[in-house]
Amino acid sequence: MTSRALVSRRSAGVLLQSLPAPITRLLQKLAPLLSPGNSSKSILPFIPRPVKWFILFIFLLNARSWPGVWHLRVFASVIRIRLHALRYKRGNGREWWTTISPVGRSIFPTPDGSDKGALSVLKSWASPDDCDWNGHLSNSCYAKNVDPARMQACIDWFPAFFGDNGWVALGGTFPHRTLYVVLTLVIGAHYHYIREIPINTHYEIRMSIGGWEDKWIYLVAKFVSHPKKSKSSSHDKPLQNPHTKSTTIPTITTPSTPLVTETSTPTEPAIPANGALASLDASTVDTKLAPNASPKPTLRTHDDDGALIHCIAVSTYCFKHGRITVPPRVVLAMCGFSLTEVGNKSNWTNANAVRDRRSVRISDFLRGGWKSESDKFWEASPKVEAERARRVADLKKLTEGMDGLRTY
């Protein structure tokens, strides 16, 4: 055996020792099968060894798309909370239910930032198996990856409702039962693609409650990422002559959304005829073209923390107990959310009082008994109700627009 072969074997042994034990054992079992040295043990000995290792590499590279991996990702939140209950739930479990429920939390983010509202964040990665031939996250994989985020959000926000044997149905789909949680796993969301997610990008799926009606509740998912700051960007700027005035020409870009929905935003400063710097507002052109049109709302490209928004998905859900629909406002209050002031825990106290009744079962209450209650603690305050109505007015345009397409 040559010295070069000895060195390569020694380096390979050092590399194996640095890997975790399960991976080391797996590679030790696969190595004889991929090696052409012993044809009796080798799989397909007529295939060259580099080709076999390349096939194995591709197989491992697509691990997130193996059979059963999607199911494991979706049900990971359910498995986690079940294991948490086995470890920490004691007695009647009231203290445990309180710790995992959003008691006193606000549904919508507060203006002062003291409460971010109902927010559930799932971190993900644009892996090669999720990307298309252009090197961007495939449109089909947005729906694939939003499923675990929706399951996690429902577990975070409505655990008490699931404990009362309720379930959540996605609009227009058939329910699927898993453990004590029933969720639909069929895609039924509206997607608005704003900006592509490049391959190998770490991104977040931020779930929030957009609003609710008498039957439906809207869950909003934002796909965001934090772009890396370039260190050389500040050094690559060309030097300017301080004695000359620079003229800035507005750039023209093609929006990802139709032009009629693009917001008019001021461009960079331009030099008018008198030589003084002024702000060139593109909305002036829009006003001349459509003088009677209402002002367009500002379209955000970044989230509150500066994260870049790539896609927004809206899902419509309804709450069920058996075959009976439960209004979202009742479920939100029963789960501990505050529909009045931030930090108000009265909804959770009243909900537990209903659960402790012996005359009326919780199932009877959720299946219509709430209608005859004198203390309607689930009613929202005027401030929360106004915010809800404002948000729902925009969210309803999605379903109304799609329903309108069915008329012709």
Image (cartoon, rainbow, N blue to C red):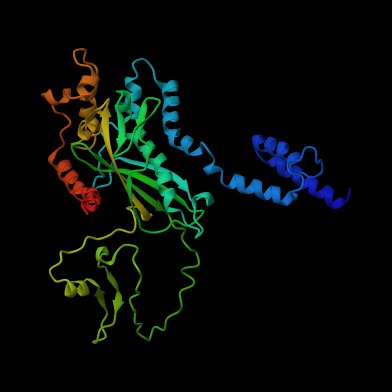
Q: Which of the two residues, 62 or 125, is positioned nearer the viewer here?
A: 62
Image quadrant holding the C terminus, namely bottom left
Left or right: residue 105 compared with residue 340: right
* Residue 75 picture location, percent across and down: 44, 33
Q: Please give left or right for residue 35 compared with residue 156 in the image.
A: right
Give coordinates of residue 206: x percent, y percent: 36, 46
Which residue ends up furthest to the top in the rendered image?
Answer: 358
Q: Which residue is painted at 26% across and 35% down in the image?
A: 318
Q: Quadrant of residue 209?
A: top left
Residue at the limit of the structure toward the left, as seen here: 374
In-front residue for pair 190/101: 190
Q: Do we see residue 293 in this rendering?
A: yes
- Is residue 345 at all visible to an observer of this figure? no
Residue drawn at point x = 33 percent, y = 16 percent: 92
Horizontal and vertical percent position of residue 153:
35, 38
**Residue at the (49%, 50%) spot, across then down:** 130
Residue 254 vertical position relative to residue 58 in the rendered view, above or below = below
**Is 11 drawn above or below residue 178 in the view shown?**
below
